[in-house]
Amino acid sequence: MHHPSCNLLFLFLFLFTGCGGYASLSDSFRQSFTQGQIQKAEKDVDEALGVGSSQQLPKKSSKNTPLLLLERGTILQAKGDYELSARDFQVADQQLEILDLTHDTPGAIAKYLYSDDAKVYKAPAYEKLLLSTLNMLNYLVLGDLQNAKVEARRFTISRNYYKSIGESEDHLLAFGSYLAGFTFEKAGDADEAMRHYADAYASGGISGLQQTVQRLHSRTRAKDARIASFLNGSVDKNPSKNGELLVVIQEGLVPYKRAVREAIGAAVAIATKPGPGARLTPAEAQRANALAAQSTMKWINYPQLTRVAYQPKPADLFVDNQKYAHSKALEIEERVIAYNDEQQGAVVTSAITRMISRAIAAQAAQATTQAIAKSSSKTSDSASALGFLVGLIVEGGMSAADTPDTRSWVTLPARMRFARISLPEGEHLIQLKRGSRYEEVTVSLKSNGFAVVNFSALR
């Protein structure tokens, strides 16, 4: 039974349980980025990193530093600061690799009692693969084929690793492999380029891939058995001297996580559904419901995915005032939603396990306090009331520390599109228009040269 004298404490704990976390930390720069306020988003993420400007890296790394560097790298890429973006992505990648090898025993203990947010951040497979894809794009825009090749190899290593552990992410691999093929093609390594294009085909393919492969084969005779059906054996005796323009368009933002409070009964239903990851057994579910019935804390906190309300208008691509079509490269939003659905049962199970731990700790504290009070000549009613208050404080304090793990890469685009266009030597005006807003850049193409343009400010 709820003790009347605890009403104020109970209300305080209810209002403040589950506040904070990465959702609060990232809210300012996520919203600024959504609204196209790139400089404000940059300033906000610098503040979150504890630095004065994007020229600086944090002197000390916290559990959120690698993720915040990913966010800043994405914002800097949208701003056009490709060198700084590449640096942030590199540093984040190195730190994430270290964290992947970290056992984090203190974090595991804190996770058991307090919050999933207590552990170091370990990026899901799709984020690690997109990190390499976006950084490859940075180097291609800069015309730095040497570092683009390094990033392409990192992408391939990550792809092979995740395939080996059953996390293939095939639908996110095709465009990364296509960019790797483009990189090696422009670097003059036709055989390596063809292997990456074949990887793109094996991962589901991408628009225009067959024509790309045919052109490369006709010039160089490079081939791969996986795409032999693409090759017609013809030889291009008069290859075009045009340059090639690759335009990448990023739009929207992926869904983000926010903390929600769920009644224990509904949470148990989620955690007992069949699915991947840890699930409550019938005995654990029964125990959770029984403890909840005895406890004043009858809810759990867990992260829930939220779609970004703003949806961008379709974009029109113009080159020298002529409109060009662009094709789908990546559907990232779909993967984020699917991954969250795969993890939800295990996440809710973890939250229920913490609730059980808190309830047990509260019962132990209550029993111990009552025993001490009785030994100190307190009346039975006084000892019971004191024990209840101590139990409530223990359980409520642990509940207040239960910050759901709302960490994820929130500035990732919801989707990416691309166009590959053959153009004559000279200067060309590239424009992307979304309604009344537009971005533009001028590129200079050499004969048989290339240029890569990224549009990601108008999300």
Image (tube, rainbow, N blue to C red):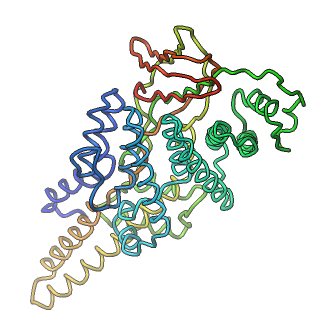
**Residue 341 in view (yes/no):** no
Instruction: Describe residue 388's horizontal placement relative to residue 33 as left or right.
Output: left
Instruction: Describe residue 51's horizontal placement relative to residue 71 as left or right.
Output: left
Above or below, comparing residue 271 to residue 454 in the picture: below
Instruction: Describe residue 366's horizontal placement relative to residue 65 as left or right.
Output: left
Q: Which residue lies furthest to the bottom in this view?
A: 375
Quarter of the image with the C terminus is: top left
Above or below, comparing residue 412 to residue 93 in the picture: above
Q: Residue furthest right?
A: 233
Where residue 454 sits: x, y (%)?
49, 29
Above or below, comparing residue 395 to residue 264 in the picture: below
Nearer to me, 117 or 38: 38
Residue plotted at (56% across, 38% down): 334
Quarter of the image with the N terminus is: bottom left
Nearer to me, 279 or 309: 309
**Residue 168 in view (yes/no):** yes
Q: How many labels does the image show?
A: 0
Q: Which residue lies furthest to the top in this view?
A: 321
Nearer to me, 263 or 61: 61
Nearer to me, 260 or 102: 102
Where residue 154 sits: x, y (%)?
58, 53
Q: Please identify the quarter of the rendering in which residue 163 is found.
A: bottom right
